[in-house]
Image (cartoon, rainbow, N blue to C red):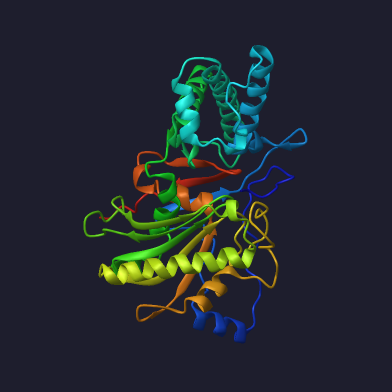
Amino acid sequence: MASQDHNNTPKKPPARKAVSDREARAQRELGIVGPHGELQLASVTIDGYSLELREGDGFVGDVASRTAFRHMLQAWRTLFTSMVGKDPLGQRPTRRLSKHQLDALLRKKGPAAQAIQAAVEDYALQLAHVVQRFLRHRSWRGVERIIIGGGFHQSEVGRRAVERARQILREEGVGAELRTLHHHSDEGGLIGWVHLAPAALLHSYDAILAVDIGGTNVRCGVVQTHLHRAPDLSRAEVVRREKWAHADDKPRRDELLEGVAAMLERLMAHARKKEIRLAPYIGVACPGLVVEDGSLAGGTQNLPGNWESTRFHLPRYLCERLPHIGQGRTQVCLHNDAVVQGLSELPFTQDVRRWAVLTVGTGLGNASYTNVAPQKTD
C-alpha cells in the first residue's frame, strides 16, 4: 500500500510536471486539474504519507499488515498440527479463512482457539513495535493519537490484537493513544473525501461520489454531507455503497477501471431515483504517491497492471468515461487511500494537535497530520 523509502524519509509527491498551455486548457475542459494529492487543507496539514522505514531486508510496516497476520497464523497452525497430530483449523488454507470463520474458531476452546490467540499476541507485539518505530521518526514526533484503520480491527481477532497492542504500549510508557476508526472500514475511505472536495460544491449539492481502490477490494459510494446538520461534516455518511472483491476475479487494470465506472453509473442512477443532488465530482483514493498532475509515482505494486505509466491517467479516464454528472462537467480528484481514510477522523481529532493513521490491509498504509489552529477574531 505504501511506497519504498530507502532513506527513511517521509514520502511527499514529486512536484507537478510542466504542461503546455494547450494541455492545461484540455485538462480544465475535462475537469481533471485537481488539485490532486493536496497536502494543505483549511483545517489540517497532511505532513506526509507512505512512510516506510527499513528494518533488515524489509520494511517495518511489513510486519503489521493483514498479510503478516496470516503468515503468523500459518506458523502457529503448523506448530499446533505437529503437536496434536491434526490440523486445528481444518482443511481450508489459511489465506481462505474469513474473519467470521476465525472469530467463530476463537470463541471455541481447544487447539484452534489457542493457535489463533497465539497469532494475535504475535501480531500485537509487532503492531506495538511498528507504532514505536514510527513515533521515533521526525515526521511523527509529537503525534498524540494513532487511528487504526482498515478492516482488520472489525473482527474479534482484530479487536483483541489492537487492544493487546494498546496495552503493550501503555506498559512501555508510550504516550500516544491508540484508537480505531469511527466509521466502518468500507466507508472511512469514502467519507474522508468530504474534507477534500471544494467547499462551494459541498454547499451547492447534497452528496458526492467517492471511490476507494485497494489491493483486494474496490469500494464506491454516495457520500451525503449533511452540512445543515453538522458544519464540521461529522455527520457525513455513505447512503449507498457498492463493493467488489476484485482480487478474486484478477482483472486487468482496464477491466478494473471499467468495473469502477459501472459501479459509479449505478450509484448515479440511485441518486437520481432518490432525488439526491450529486455534485459533478468524484474523489478517488488509491495506494501510492499522488503527483499534483494526477499521475502516480510509486507504491501501486498491489494493484493489477502498470498504474505508473506515463500513458495512464486515472482522473482523465473517469472524466472521459463519465463526462457529466447531472448538468455539470465531471471533476475527478485523486489522493492516497490512507490519507483519505484518515481524514474521515478529522471531526473527532479536534482535541489533539498531531495525529496519524495506520491502515491495516494488503499492506500497511500510513499518514500523519497536524491540525491547524483556528484563527482568533477580535
Q: Residue furthest bottom?
A: 22
Question: Where is 350 relative to 22, above or below?
Answer: above
Horizontal and vertical percent for residue 131?
56, 32
Q: Residue furthest top?
A: 83
From the image, which quarter does the C terminus lie in? bottom left
Describe residue 361's horizontal placement relative to residue 211 as left or right: right
Q: Is residue 120 visible?
A: yes
Q: Residue furthest left?
A: 229
The image quarter containing residue 349 is top left
Horizontal and vertical percent for residue 136?
61, 33
Query: How many numbered callouts?
Result: 0
Q: Is residue 137 visible?
A: no
Horizontal and vertical percent for residue 31?
49, 77
Residue 74 or 221: which is nearer the viewer?
Answer: 74
Q: Residue at x 61, y 87 (%)?
A: 22
Describe residue 284's horizontal placement relative to residue 255 as left or right: left
Residue 288 or 36: which is nearer the viewer?
Answer: 288
Horizontal and vertical percent for residue 46?
51, 51
The image quarter containing residue 362 is top right
Question: Where is 27 relative to 173, above or below?
Answer: below
Q: Residue furthest right?
A: 57
Q: Residue at x 30, y 50 (%)?
A: 234
